């Protein structure tokens, strides 16, 4: 009984990132099961999940092998911690696997349960590292405006979302933000390559402003996800890398979305050929089947800790939870066995890129961009000027998202930017379905705003 569930849900369940009044009026959509790339709701509707849940169900829904691995581990050892000199087989196996998948200079992992925790951990980790190396003043972390790095206090401070800062008295001290390489929205008449260089050099200017001896690290996603799928110009990352190397600033890649195949390589850092000192991971690590996350740590930082740092006074009851580790390991084994990352790179990404680019001809679209299996559509009333819907920022995107929902497609909107990040196993015919449904919903949105 959908209505009963909706009423109880609205009465007792406080949802994340949800307008409570809207929830009370409309009721939540009750998702009851899922298979492959499809979700089913309590009314029997089938929807193509263009967002892989929250950018996480990389191997698709309904993988019995992951369920069985978790069940076996539940029977064997449902829980034990990794504090105080203890370990267990699944955490050892997963750590070895992650070290083999990560770039060669990264061979260590610290576990948490969510991307937010990973980013909170990384803040403490880089400060502890510099203090261990005799530089306790190197504390400032430079992040980017409009980024999303999670909802815990330090992660939301790293994030550059003004609305989130306003609600919690954030950011915490010693975190600053520079502009992002968002060419479509902020590049004006500039050549994208020049714009990418300019936005990278903002990091150097910020380091000069603060003082190199005070800056610990720079954090960014290889491709910014929830902040609107900002795909950087190719000039951006090499310049960021140069600056971090020359100024002795640790580079942190937030791989929570980009990691585990999303961009056509195991990590977004591989796609952009960057060499981060630390990478935060979550989501695709277990394809969302169980909560598990972590920080992948380079030999340089780990050895600094080990040689000089003593005990790192940080950790979670569920750091390296055995059942979550078993699920994550099986997920990674599936990805390897089915060559899912290669499938994104060689099949799905080029296929999506061609179909997606064609949506750029729609009268409502200012830009259709994609990289790997993450893509965005910029809605505009004026293609030539790349103009936003100034007066109603956000609402046109919302209208489009509602049409998608009602026509069997989950797409997300960030203001007037429509976003997809489907499961990595999406087939070419499912990509056709996704793009055709998106085109139909753009037509319906256009008709609405003309009416
Ligand atoms: N970092 C990025 C880039 C994210 O997109 C997210 C979540 O969407 C997070 C961190 C936070 O992850 P979690 O929701 O698992 O705390």
Image: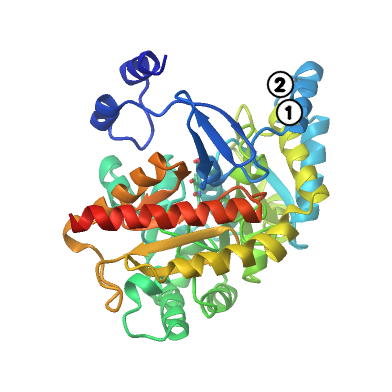
Side of 8 where 350 appears, left or right? right
Please state which of residues 239 and 285 is positioned toward the viewer in this rendering.
285
Q: Residue 25: where, in percent of width, then height? A: 24, 26
Q: What's the colour scheme?
A: rainbow
Side of 73 where 30 appears, left or right? left
**Residue at image location 63% in from the left, 28% down from the top:** 318
Q: Residue 317: where, in percent of width, then height? A: 61, 27
Q: Residue 180: where, in percent of width, then height? A: 40, 68
Residue underneath mark 1:
322
Q: CA distance from mark 1 to mark 2?
A: 6 Å
Q: Residue 221: where, in percent of width, then height? A: 52, 60
Please state which of residues 191 and 93 is positioned toward the viewer in this rendering.
191
Look at the image and tell me whether residue 95 can be seen: no
Please state which of residues 131 and 267 is positioned toward the viewer in this rendering.
267
| Quarter the N terminus occupies | top left
Tag 1 secondary structure: helix
Residue underneath mark 2:
79
How many marks do you count on the picture? 2
Is the Cβ of the residue at disc 1 closer than 8 Å to that at disc 2?
A: yes
């Amino acid at each position: 009984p959908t209505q009963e569930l909706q009423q109880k849900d609205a009465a007792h369940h406080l949802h994340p990132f949800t307008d409570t009044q809207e929830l009370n009026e409309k009721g939540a959509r009750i998702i009851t099961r899922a298979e492959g790339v499809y979700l089913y709701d309590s009314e029997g509707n089938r929807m193509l999940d263009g967002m892989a849940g929250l950018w996480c169900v990389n191997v698709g829904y309904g993988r019995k092998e992951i369920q069985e691995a978790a069940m076996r581990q539940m029977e064997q050892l449902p829980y034990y911690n990794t504090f105080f000199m203890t370990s267990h087989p699944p955490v050892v196996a997963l750590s070895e696997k992650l070290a083999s998948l990560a770039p060669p200079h990264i061979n260590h992992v610290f576990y948490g349960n969510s991307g937010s925790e990973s980013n909170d951990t990384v803040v403490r980790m880089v400060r502890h590292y510099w203090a261990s190396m005799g530089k306790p003043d190197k504390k400032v972390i430079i992040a980017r405006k409009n980024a999303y790095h999670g909802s815990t206090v330090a992660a939301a401070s790293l994030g550059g979302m003004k609305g989130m800062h306003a609600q919690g008295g954030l950011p915490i001290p010693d975190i600053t933000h520079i502009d992002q390489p968002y060419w479509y929205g902020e590049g004006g008449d500039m050549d994208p390559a020049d714009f990418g260089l300019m936005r990278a050099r903002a990091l150097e200017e910020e380091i000069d402003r603060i003082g190199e001896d005070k800056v610990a690290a720079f954090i960014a996603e290889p491709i910014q996800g929830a902040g609107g799928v900002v795909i950087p110009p190719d000039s951006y990352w090499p310049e960021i890398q140069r600056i971090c190397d020359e100024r002795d600033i640790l580079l942190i890649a937030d791989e929570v979305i980009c990691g585990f195949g999303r961009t056509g390589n195991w990590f977004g850092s591989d796609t952009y050929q960057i060499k981060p000192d630390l990478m935060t991971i979550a989501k695709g690590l277990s394809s969302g089947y169980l909560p598990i996350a972590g920080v992948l740590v380079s030999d340089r930082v780990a050895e600094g800790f080990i040689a000089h740092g003593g005990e790192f006074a940080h950790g979670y009851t569920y750091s390296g939870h055995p059942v979550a580790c078993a699920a994550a390991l099986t997920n990674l084994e599936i990805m390897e066995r089915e060559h899912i990352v290669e499938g994104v790179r060689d099949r799905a990404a080029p296929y999506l890129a061609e179909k997606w680019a064609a949506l750029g001809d729609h009268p409502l679209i200012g830009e259709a961009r994609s990289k790997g299996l993450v893509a965005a559509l910029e809605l505009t009333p004026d293609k030539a000027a790349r103009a936003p819907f100034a007066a109603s920022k956000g609402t046109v995107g919302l209208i489009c998202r509602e049409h998608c929902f009602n026509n069997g497609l989950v797409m997300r909107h960030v203001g007037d930017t429509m976003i997809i990040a489907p499961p990595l196993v999406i087939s070419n015919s499912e990509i056709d379905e996704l793009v055709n449904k998106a085109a139909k919903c753009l037509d319906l949105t256009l008709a609405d705003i003309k009416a």
